[in-house]
Image (spheres, rainbow, N blue to C red):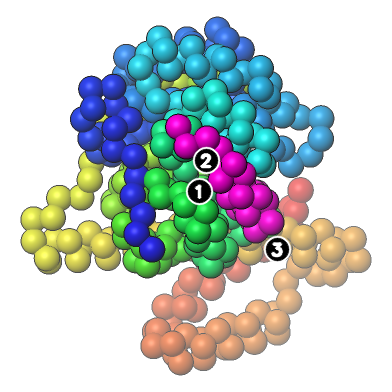
Amino acid sequence: MEFKFLQSLLTDGSTLQTPLIIAGPCSAESRDQVLSTAKELRAAGVSIFRAGVWKPRTRPGCFEGIGEAALPWLQEAKRLTGMAIATEVANATHLQLAAKAGVDILWIGARTVANPFTVQEIADAWNELPDELKNNISFLIKNPVNADLELWIGAFERLYKAGIRRLGAVHRGFSSYGATAYRNPPEWRIPIEFHRRHPEIPLICDPSHISGRRENVAKIARQSMNLNFDGLMIEVHNNPECALSDAEQQITPAQLIDLIHTLSKPVNCGSSDTELQNLRNEIDILDDKLIEILAKRMEVSRAIGSLKKLNGIPVIQNERYKKLVTDRAELASDAGLNPAFIKKILSVIHEESVKLQLDPQ
């Protein structure tokens, strides 16, 4: 397959900025909120404004978007600022309404991508649109909620077979059970493999949904740039503390400007420099994974402490610990690691686990 991405989204007809920045609130909540945020983002140099009109939520009772009534707000933002506009579509009806409203970029969200029937429904609905609407629309496909690369690629294939060629990928992390460092751990190896298979598809990172907290958005954004992503989709709200959805992960326009100033694509001064940077990126990814694993281990230790306390079982189990160290040292040796090094690490981990078991609350 040969994909392409719309290259005339800027009002002056120039090519897309590098890195590409797509920014705007999680949800279009009111006309004033949309226009105020859009004007600030345009002043910051952003060329594509995003806002959710229909919001798929995990549980009922949460704010699920204004719906069709919010589309005129996006149209007005486009008219006043010259920015292209983007919103999420989750079914054929959304596609038809957004296309008729002149939305430039439609993205298919993680929950929708996880359902091939729904993706196919959207692909089929595309063929029912008038040609004059099709010529002006690009699609972004987010990775599915589960870490399934083939499912992600399958969504592209379904749209491609429907005749859609303006396509881009958005990496927003993957759902994970239990406590983790991020809302949706990035599992960087998956988008990296996606890009290896399809280098022609622009790859955009969504650090807002990966981090889940605004203080980590810049870190994830910089990591994605170090991994040669083509752009960012960031949730930006003019008053994030009062946002009706995902308030914790949205930043202000001023914070976005600061973030953009810290971004830089890797400079390839030579093959050795590039290789070194790639290896450092890999170390960063593995360190993040270590932290996530340790957090899950400590969560289990806390549960063990509660169970021991309930049943009057002593916290320290010397024989159990000795066997654990012996077994892990053998595994370390088989893996080419220094057993003494592993024993030191296990000693520190065990000490922290004992503290949690003594006070599991």
Q: Quadrant of the N terminus?
A: bottom left
Principal secondary structure, stretch drawn in magenta: helix
Q: Residue at x 58, y 88 (%)?
A: 327
Q: What residue sits right under mark 3 in the picture? A: 301
Q: Which mark is residue 141?
A: 1
Q: What residue sits right under mark 2 in the picture? A: 107
Q: Residue at x 63, y 54 (%)?
A: 120
Q: Residue at x 47, y 85 (%)?
A: 332
The location of residue 162, given as percent across then percent down, is 52, 53
Crowding at dot 3, Cα within 10 Å, few <14 / some 14-19 / many 20+, comes out as many
- Which circle's residue, 3 or 1, is located before the other in the chain? 1
Could you tell whether 59 is left or right of 228 in the image? right
The location of residue 190, given as percent across then percent down, is 46, 63
Q: Secondary structure at mark 1?
A: strand
Three-letter code for the amino acid on which mark 3 is drawn: Ser
Do we see residue 1 in this rendering? yes
Tell me the mark number nearer the camera, choosing from 3 and 1.
Answer: 1
Examine the structure image and report whether residue 223 is included in the region drawn in magenta.
no
The location of residue 333, given as percent across then percent down, is 44, 90
Q: Secondary structure at mark 2?
A: strand
Write down the region rendered in magenta. Answer: 106-132
Do we see residue 257 in this rendering? no
- Which circle's residue, 1 or 2, is located before the other in the chain? 2
- Separation (CA) of disc 3 from disc 1: 39 Å
Could you tell whether 22 is left or right of 34 in the image? left
Three-letter code for the amino acid on which mark 2 is drawn: Trp
